[in-house]
Image (cartoon, grey):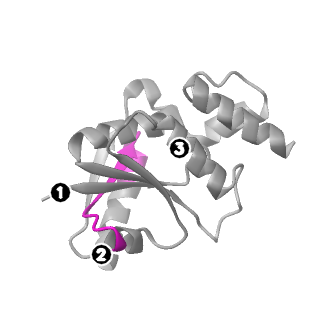
């Protein structure tokens, strides 16, 4: 039986930390869905959902068993609609672990049988967050510690169009 996982996130923007998580999940699962989750309760973010999708597609372009998509609904609905039985989440520290553990228990109320796999971040990338990335982008900093060259150029292009 094919094992499929979702890596949900805002990906605003996708970073090397996200790519590391997705790459590692892709080694564990037959197929991984990197899904831009759109939350109507939050502000629109730095990038539109379509831009975030293009950025994550660029960032994972060399990982063959990864599909990218946008979801405007619940993660549990996406998993049910796509036959996904696993959620892969990255954890950088104990706070992340506690938060993701709580979410994993909640998720079981929405999708019985779904399992969450927590993957510790690479220590070299544990400082990485989308908030950190957005600050570097806003201040015109070098983005080589955030994304590969092609993806960094795409991020800059989208950001500059907004200015």
- How many residues crowd mark 2 within 10 Å: few (<14), some (14–19), many (20+)? some
Q: Is residue 50 left or right of residue 129?
A: right
N-term-proximal mark, 2 vs 1: 1
Q: Secondary structure at mark 3?
A: helix
- Identify which residue, 49 or 46, lies in the foreground: 49
Residues shaded magenta: 81-98
* Callout count: 3
Disc number placed over residue 53 in the picture, else none:
none
6 inside magenta stretch: no
Disc number placed over residue 56 in the picture, else none:
3
In whole angstroms, how far apart are the C-alphas of marks 3 and 1?
23 Å
The residue at 46%/37% (across/down) is 61
Is the residue under label 1 in contact with that under label 2 (CB below 8 Å)?
A: no
The residue at 61%/43% (across/down) is 13
The residue at 57%/51% (across/down) is 53
As drawn, the residue found furthest toward the left would be: 1
In the image, is residue 115 above or below residue 131?
below
Query: How far across and how far down the image is residue 149, in percent?
Result: 59, 23
**Would you identify the image quadrant in which residue 103 lies?**
bottom left
Write down the residue under mark 2.
Answer: 111
Query: How far across and how far down the image is residue 7, in percent?
Result: 39, 52
- Identify which residue, 102 or 130, lies in the foreground: 130
Q: Secondary structure at mark 2?
A: loop
96 inside magenta stretch: yes
As drawn, the residue found furthest toward the right would be: 163
Name the mark nearer the viewer: 2 or 3.
3
Is the C terminus in the top left, top right, bottom left or bottom right quadrant?
top right
Disc number placed over residue 2 in the picture, else none:
1
In whole angstroms, how far apart are the C-alphas of marks 2 and 3?
26 Å
In the image, is residue 122 above or below residue 95?
above
Is the residue under label 3 in contact with that under label 2 (CB below 8 Å)?
A: no
């Amino acid at each position: 039986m094919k094992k499929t996982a979702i890596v949900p996130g805002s990906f605003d923007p996708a970073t090397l930390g996200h790519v590391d998580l997705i790459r590692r999940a892709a080694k564990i699962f037959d197929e991984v869905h990197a899904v831009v989750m759109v939350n109507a309760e939050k502000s629109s973010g730095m990038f539109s959902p379509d831009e975030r999708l293009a950025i994550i597609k660029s960032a994972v372009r060399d990982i063959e068993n990864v599909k990218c998509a946008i979801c405007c609904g619940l993660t549990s609905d996406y998993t049910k609609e796509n036959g996904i039985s696993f959620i892969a989440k990255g954890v950088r520290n104990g706070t992340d672990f506690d938060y993701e553990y709580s979410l994993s228990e909640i998720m079981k109320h929405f999708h019985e049988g779904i399992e969450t796999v927590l993957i510790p971040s690479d220590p070299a990338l544990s400082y990485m967050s989308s908030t950190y990335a957005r600050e570097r982008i806003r201040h015109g900093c070098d983005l080589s510690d955030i994304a590969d060259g092609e993806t960094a150029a795409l991020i800059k292009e989208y950001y500059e169009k907004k200015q």
